[in-house]
Amino acid sequence: MATQLQFRRGTTAQNNSFTGANGEISIDTDSKNLRIHDGANAGGYEIIPTGTIVAYGGTAAPAGWLLCDATAVSRTTYARLFAVIGTGFGIGDGTTTFNVPDVRDRFPLGKGANNATLGATGTAAAASGTITSSNITGVLTAASNTGTSTTGTGTSGGTVAVIPAATYTTVASNTVAGATVANATVAGATVASNTGTGTTGSTTQTITVGNVSVAASAKDSTLATVVNSVNTAGHTHTIPALTVPALTVPALTIPALTVPALTIPALTIPTMNTASHTHTIPGLSIPALTIPALTVADHTTTIALPFEVTNFIIKL
């Protein structure tokens, strides 16, 4: 075998303390990893960082890698990997082991706002895409379309419709029974006698006339007698007793009232004939029809992804 170019090599501990020259490459014999150094920072930088997950077509993981099959591995043996992923994909036995990721029958899903927990699992995953309305907006206009006028032909012959006569319907006699109001008597009422008190004295008036003598005229001394006073003697009036007789209201009887039977006479509907006639269907014109612009709003559609099975491996 021809001479090959060789790089510095050492254990993980040796590499972690090695600064090297800027651009120098070394090999970690423990992790089977390449490191590149910058001449300033001890340990340099792994070309394939521990914890890297990639698809792998082999059935078994190569050296420096483990299958992503949820296996519980030693926290001490794989301390570098444990330092990177911790128990995010499973706590193992809780003390000495931890679990590697499990990508069997699963699609890896990028960590984001909707799935923010590293190592979280789900029962289904689907790819989705948004179709914006601006990509599919368009105007669709249908051509004008006018229908031909159509007239129906008149029918000939009688179009007589006969309504049969209705049968007589009689409402049975209905008599309201007589009603008698019982006698009502107002009791007699008597006003007590009332008699005025009589006065004492004669009921005959005595008139006394006083006379005086005066000259009959101025020419002689003849005397004449004239009346100069009239007196009426005292007397008494007697008011007889006034008696109001008893007043009796006689009984009042309302005679029975009978409503005679009421009969509704039979009603007959005569037959009705409709004369022959013709119906004409006028022409029908369909005006131009324009379909306005159609805009489909944004929506999300789910697409089934075809797949091919492979292994996933994680770097130690």
Image (cartoon, rainbow, N blue to C red):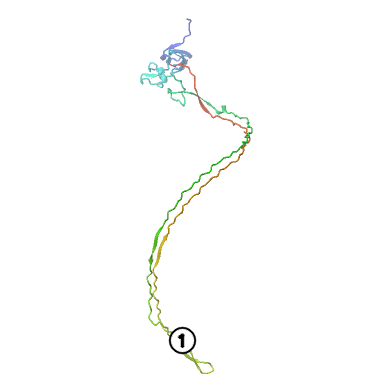
Res 160 → quadrant: top right
| Image height of 46 relative to 299, above or below | above
> Circle 1 — which element?
strand
Tell me the kind of residue under disc 1: Ser
Q: Residue placed at 45% from the left, 11% from the top?
A: 8
* Drawn side of residue 143 relative to residue 297, left or right: right
| Image height of 50 relative to 181, above or below | above
| Image height of 221 relative to 113, above or below | below
Image coords of residue 209 (percent x, y): 45, 87
Residue pointed to by mark 1:
229
Q: Residue placed at 46% from the left, 89% from the top?
A: 211
* Drawn side of residue 304 relative to residue 187, left or right: right
Task: Compare residues 266 and 229 and report the one nearer the observer.
Answer: 266
Image coords of residue 302 (percent x, y): 50, 24
Asked if residue 83 shows in the view, the reply is yes
Task: Compare residues 235 and 224 and report the one nearer the observer.
Answer: 235
Badge 1 crowding class, 10 Å Cα cut-off, few under 14, some 14 to 19, many 20 or more, is few
Task: Compare residues 114 and 95 and report the one nearer the observer.
Answer: 114
Q: Residue placed at 38% from the left, 66% from the top?
A: 188
Task: Compare residues 5 and 150 and report the one nearer the observer.
Answer: 150
Image coords of residue 31 (percent x, y): 42, 14
Res 100 → quadrant: top left
Considering every residue shown, the one lying at the far bottom of the view is 221
Image coords of residue 9 (percent x, y): 44, 11
Exactly how many numbered labels are in the figure?
1
Question: Which quadrant holds the C terminus?
Answer: top left
Asked if residue 46 shows in the view, the reply is no
